[in-house]
C-alpha cells in the first residue's frame, strides 16, 4: 500500500493542466500532514479534521469567504485521489474515506453583474495605468466579449483564431473546448498582438512586450492595480469571473437562457430534467454570434441579419 507522498505524484501525472492546478495545492497540504501514512490509514473523521485544518489556514484573498471553499476543494482533491486508488485496486470503494465525508455547504455567491458605469470606470483605469495598457486592455476586452474563464484566455494560441469567421477556440476546464464568436475589432487586435509580440503558433497568445507568455500573476497584478484606483472594486473583491458574470447576465436578459447557456460554454447539468431540456433548446453558434453583435454593436459574419442593431431599451 503506497503512502500519500508516493501516490500523489502518480495521480498528478494523469491529470490535465487545469485539473492539476485546481488540486495540486491541496495535495501538497495532504502530503505535508499525511505524507508518510498509507492510503488505507485515514478515517472519515480524520478527513474532516484535515478539511478543518485547511479551512482555518486558508490564504485570505480579496474574495475569501472564511476558508469554506478551501475545505470543499480539499475534499474534492481527496476524492479524486481515492477514486484513482479504487480504480488501481488499492482499496475498495466501501473503504473510501473521502466518499463518506459530505462537502461543506456552499454559501450563495456574492458575485453580481457590473453596470455600465462600473465597466467604464474599470476600462478607464486599465487603459490609462500600468506598464502595459495595451495588454491589459486586450485581456479585459477578451473576457468581456467572450465571457471566457481565466484558463481559457491563458490557453489561447494564435492557431486558435479563425479570422475569416471571427471565432476563437476556447479550451477551458474539464477538457472542454468551443468556438466562440468575437467582434472584428477584437479579432484584429488579437492577431496584431500575436504578430507584434512574436507569439508562436502553438504557444500562448497573450504576451509581455519581451515576448514572454503571461501567467496568472498578470491578472493578480491587474486587479490589485484597479483596486488601488477604485475602492469599490477592491472592497467587493471583484475578479475575472465578475466580467464573465456580467456578460452572461446581459445575454440571458436579452436573448434567453439557451443562448446564455451556449455563450458560457456550459455543458448539460447533472439534473436529468435540465439535461433533457437543454438538448431540445440548445442555442446555435449563429444565435451566440447574434448576441455578441448586439453586445458589441459590431456586425459579425455569423450573426443573423440585423442582429447587431438590437435596441437595449426594448
Image (tube, rainbow, N blue to C red):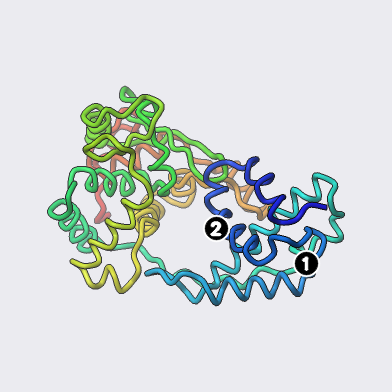
At 28% from the left edge and 63% from the top edge, which residue is drawn? Answer: 224
Residue depicted at x 56% and y 40%: 175
Compare residues 232 and 298 and report the one nearer the observer: 232
State the residue at coordinates (29%, 57%): 221
For label 2, the SS is helix
Q: Which residue is outermost to the front?
A: 36
Judge by depth and name the residue closer to the eye, 67 or 26. 26
In this image, 61 relative to 131: left or right? right
Badge 2 is on which residue? 25
Question: Does dot 1 land on a helix, a strand or a loop?
Answer: loop
Q: Looking at the image, which is closer to me, 64 or 20?
A: 20
Q: Do the residues bearing badges 1 and 2 touch, measured as CB atoms within 8 Å?
A: no
Q: Residue most toward the top?
A: 164
Front in this rendered view, residue 263 or 100 = 100
> In the image, 39: left or right of 218?
right
The C terminus lies in which quarter of the figure?
Answer: bottom left
Establish if 314 lies above or below 259.
below
Residue 174 rendering spot, x and y as whole percentages: 57, 44
Number of marks? 2
Q: State left or right for residue 263 relative to residue 124.
A: right
Provide residue 261's location: percent of width, then percent of height.
Answer: 49, 48
Would you identify the image quadrant in which residue 235 lies? bottom left
- Residue at image coords 20%, 63%: 117
- Residue named by callout 1: 42
Amino acid at each position: 500500500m503506497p503512502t500519500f507522498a508516493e501516490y500523489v505524484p502518480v495521480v498528478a501525472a494523469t491529470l490535465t493542466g487545469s485539473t492539476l492546478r485546481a488540486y495540486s495545492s491541496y495535495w501538497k497540504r495532504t502530503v505535508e500532514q499525511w505524507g508518510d501514512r498509507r492510503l488505507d490509514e485515514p478515517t472519515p473523521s480524520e478527513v474532516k479534521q484535515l478539511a478543518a485544518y485547511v479551512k482555518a489556514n486558508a490564504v485570505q484573498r480579496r474574495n475569501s469567504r472564511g476558508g469554506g471553499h478551501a475545505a470543499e476543494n480539499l475534499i474534492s482533491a481527496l476524492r479524486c485521489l481515492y477514486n484513482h486508488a479504487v480504480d488501481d485496486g488499492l482499496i475498495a470503494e466501501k473503504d473510501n474515506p473521502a466518499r463518506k465525508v459530505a462537502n461543506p455547504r456552499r454559501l450563495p455567491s456574492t458575485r453580481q453583474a457590473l453596470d455600465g458605469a462600473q465597466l467604464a470606470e474599470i476600462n478607464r483605469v486599465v487603459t490609462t495605468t500600468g506598464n502595459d495598457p495595451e495588454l491589459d486592455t486586450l485581456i479585459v476586452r477578451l473576457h468581456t466579449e467572450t465571457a471566457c474563464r481565466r484558463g481559457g484566455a491563458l490557453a489561447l494560441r494564435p492557431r486558435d483564431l479563425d479570422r475569416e469567421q471571427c471565432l476563437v477556440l476556447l479550451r477551458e476546464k474539464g477538457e472542454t473546448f468551443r468556438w466562440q464568436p468575437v467582434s472584428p475589432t477584437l479579432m484584429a487586435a488579437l492577431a496584431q498582438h500575436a504578430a507584434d509580440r512574436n507569439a508562436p503558433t502553438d504557444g500562448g497568445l497573450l504576451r509581455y512586450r519581451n515576448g514572454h507568455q503571461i501567467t496568472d500573476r498578470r491578472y493578480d497584478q491587474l486587479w490589485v492595480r484597479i483596486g488601488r484606483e477604485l475602492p469599490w472594486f477592491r472592497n467587493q473583491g471583484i475578479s475575472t469571473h465578475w466580467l464573465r458574470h456580467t456578460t452572461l447576465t446581459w445575454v440571458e436578459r436579452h436573448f434567453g437562457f439557451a443562448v446564455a447557456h451556449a455563450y458560457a460554454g456550459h455543458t448539460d447539468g447533472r439534473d436529468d430534467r435540465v439535461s433533457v431540456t437543454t438538448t431540445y433548446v440548445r442555442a446555435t453558434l449563429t444565435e451566440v454570434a447574434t448576441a455578441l453583435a448586439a453586445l458589441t454593436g459590431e456586425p459579425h459574419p455569423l450573426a443573423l441579419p440585423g442582429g447587431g442593431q438590437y435596441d437595449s431599451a426594448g
